[in-house]
Amino acid sequence: MTGIVATGTEFITTGLSIGTQSLRTASQSLDMLELYVRKAKLDQVDAHKAHRDTFRLELIEDQARERTRRQKALAAEVYADPQTKALYDANYARLSALFD
């Protein structure tokens, strides 16, 4: 009987030890995950600040370049010929009036 009690006690002790180790491992894993998420959040905040710092400037520069290209192409195509310019001006006025 003593052997059975000793075996039972060892079984329970081993089970508790495994359970404790499992909980410790799970806790450490959660701590690591929390640190990873916290770092990722800080990185995202910093990256967003840097992006916002340059976004508007780059947007304005890109749009200014694109408008310049279009205006140069328009000038070369439309204003080189008086008849084309007259037609363009009439069409531009008519279409612009749609949005007034």
Image (cartoon, helix red, strand yellow):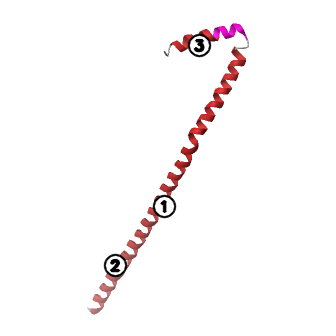
Q: Quadrant of residue 3?
A: bottom left
Residue beneath label 3, please? 92
Q: Please, is residue 85 above or below residue 19 in the view?
A: above
Which residue is label 2 attached to?
A: 16
What range is drawn magenta here?
81-87
**Disc 3 marks which amino acid?**
Tyr
User: Which image quadrant for residue 30?
Assistant: bottom left
Q: Is residue 86 inside the magenta stretch?
A: yes
Q: Earlier in the sequence, mark 3 or mark 2?
A: 2
Point out the image quarter for the N terminus: bottom left
Q: Give the residue drawn at x 70%, y 21%.
A: 73
Tell me the amino acid under the disc marked 1.
Tyr
Callout 1 touching callout 2 (CB < 8 Å): no
Query: Looking at the image, is mark 1 or mark 2 earlier in the sequence?
Result: 2
Gap between marks 3 and 1 measured at Cα = 57 Å
Q: Tell me the mark number nearer the camera, choosing from 3 and 1.
A: 3
- Is the residue marked by circle 3 packed among few (<14), some (14-19), or many (20+) residues within 10 Å? few
- List x then y, in percent, for residue 18: 38, 77
Amino acid type, label 2? Leu
Residue 56 screen position, x and y as percent: 56, 38
* Depth order, front residue of 53/17: 53
The numbered disc on residue 36 is: 1
Q: Secondary structure at mark 2?
A: helix
